[in-house]
Amino acid sequence: MKVAVIGANGQLGTDLVRVLQAQRRIEVFPLTRANLDVRDVQSVHQALLALKPDIVINTAAYTRVDESEDRPDLAFAVNAL
């Protein structure tokens, strides 16, 4: 089974990748901001099309609460769209 983990270098993503990689039957594709920009639908589409994962887990999040108040468009784009 192939699993793509978006946001793989965040707090949740890091732990999830480690647990999944310990499973021998699972091929894990850790995706970080360097691999794709979750705000760019085309970037996400191209990355997932190339990998063809069976499962996609999105752990990407904009978690800087104080900055989110100053940059609501960015926080909304990452966390909601």
Image (cartoon, helix red, strand yellow):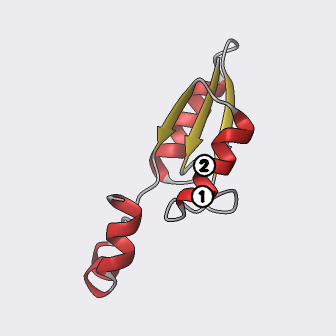
Amino acid type for the residue under numbered disc 2: His
Q: Is residue 7 above or below residue 64?
A: above
Q: The residue tagged with tag 2: helix, strand or loop?
A: helix
Q: Quadrant of the C terminus?
A: bottom left
Q: Quadrant of residue 79?
A: bottom left
Q: Spot the residue most to the bottom.
A: 70
Q: Please state the horizontal and vertical placement of residue 80, each as a whole percent of the image.
A: 32, 58
Q: Please state the horizontal and vertical placement of residue 29, each as a whole percent of the image.
A: 68, 37
Q: Name the residue: 34% across, 83% down.
A: 71
Amino acid type for the residue under numbered disc 1: Gln
Q: The residue tagged with tag 1: helix, strand or loop?
A: helix
Q: Are marks 1 and 2 in contact (CB under 8 Å)?
A: yes
Residue assigned mark 2: 45
Q: Name the residue: 29% across, 73% down.
A: 65
Q: Name the residue: 67% across, 50% down.
A: 46
Q: Quadrant of residue 27?
A: top right
Residue 42, which numbered label?
1
